[in-house]
Amino acid sequence: MAAGLIRLHFHDCFVHGCDASILLDQTPTIRTEKTAGGNNMSITGFEAIDAAKARVEKICPGVVSCADIVAVAARDASAYVGGPTWNVKLGRRDSTSAYPDVAVTDLPSHNDDVETLIKRFKGKGLNVREMVALSGAHTLGDAQCSSFRDRIYSDGANIDGAYAGVLRRRCPLVGGDNVTAPFDPVTPDHFDNKRGLLASDQVLYSGGGVTDGIVREYGKLAGRFRDDFAAAMVKMGEIQPLTGSAGQIRRICGAVN
Ligand code: HEM
């Protein structure tokens, strides 16, 4: 649950800004982002956001946006699993549409090389260091077999042999696409600075690359990783917000008013 909420904020902010567009359900006029690209059958946390929104609306109707609730939930999720906490700036408003095509083009893929990852984050105003810090969120939660199969069967030189063996027993070469494995097999539900599972995590530490030094630094200095993660989450939460009279405050998060 905590992992899903942190990822939900990321996938909201990277697609047309932090505007809760990811929460909109499919209707005749809205094409949902929920089934687009990396979100399909993978993104979670909607029920928790809906429940929080319902409680907030009861006390204070029409004031707190769904986008702000997603941002606060990500912060609380991090703190709940032992990760850092931070002050969430509020005042985002909600979109009146969803952007599934942007989800396909703008969300990073587990197959991206380091240059592509850097470019994607730069496109959202986040620098290399912030990208590496944010990728540290992969200390939490799970990935499906389809997200790491290539790596455990064909990236022999770049993955610990015993670790790959365990993963292969879990994730067959054919089938089992939705079987999951934890990102961090030792402490899957705890926020820390340990090893990665996806190819896109490994390319951040691959011998001589621009991000290697940062990964090494975070591996040694857990406190610095936590501080940088928190600061980068604040910055990520500022991507293209709707403010003023733009957008709306949705009454329920899954539909426009
Ligand atoms: C650097 C580029 C990134 C790539 C390529 C990437 C890719 C992925 C993939 C493929 C999964 C597994 C999905 C599945 O198999 O169902 C995943 C899970 C996850 N990602 Fe990322 N991600 C990136 C950055 C981030 C960032 C910036 C955050 C948050 C700040 C984040 C948070 C998470 C979390 C928490 C999970 C686990 C979700 C769960 O267990 O429900 N990721 N990511």
Image (cartoon, rainbow, N blue to C red):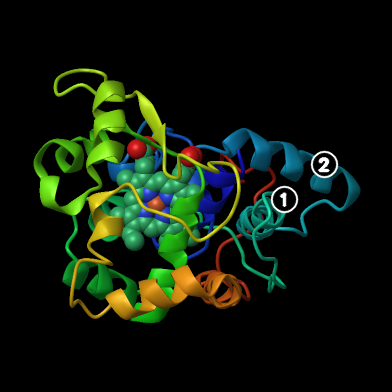
Residue 141 x, y percent position in the rendering = 49, 41
Q: Residue at x 56, y 40 (%)?
A: 255
Determine the image quadrant of residue 64: bottom right
Please state, as top left, top right, bottom left or bottom right, where the N terminus lies in the image: top right
Residue 240 appears in the figure: no
- Amino acid type of the residue tagged 1 in the rendering: Tyr
Determine the image quadrant of residue 2: top right
Disc 2 designates what residue? 55
Q: Residue at x 56, y 57 (%)?
A: 192
- Amino acid type of the residue tagged 2 in the rendering: Arg
Tell me, yes or no, whether the two marked residues, 1 and 2, touch with CB atoms within 8 Å.
Answer: no
Helix, strand or loop for disc 1: helix
Label 2 near ligand 1 (CB < 8 Å): no
| Res. 71 mark | none
Name the side, left or right, on which 23 lies relative to 53: left
Q: Residue extending furthest top?
A: 175
The one nearer the camera, 50 or 99, is: 50
The one nearer the camera, 41 or 57, is: 41
Residue 19 x, y percent position in the rendering = 53, 60
Q: Is residue 221 above or below residue 44?
A: below
Helix, strand or loop for disc 2: helix
Q: Residue at x 12, y 51 (%)?
A: 157
Residue 103 x, y percent position in the rendering = 32, 52
Q: CA distance from mark 1 to mark 2?
A: 20 Å
Residue 179 x, y percent position in the rendering = 35, 23
Q: Residue extending furthest right?
A: 59
The one nearer the camera, 41 or 143, is: 143
Disc 1 designates what residue? 80
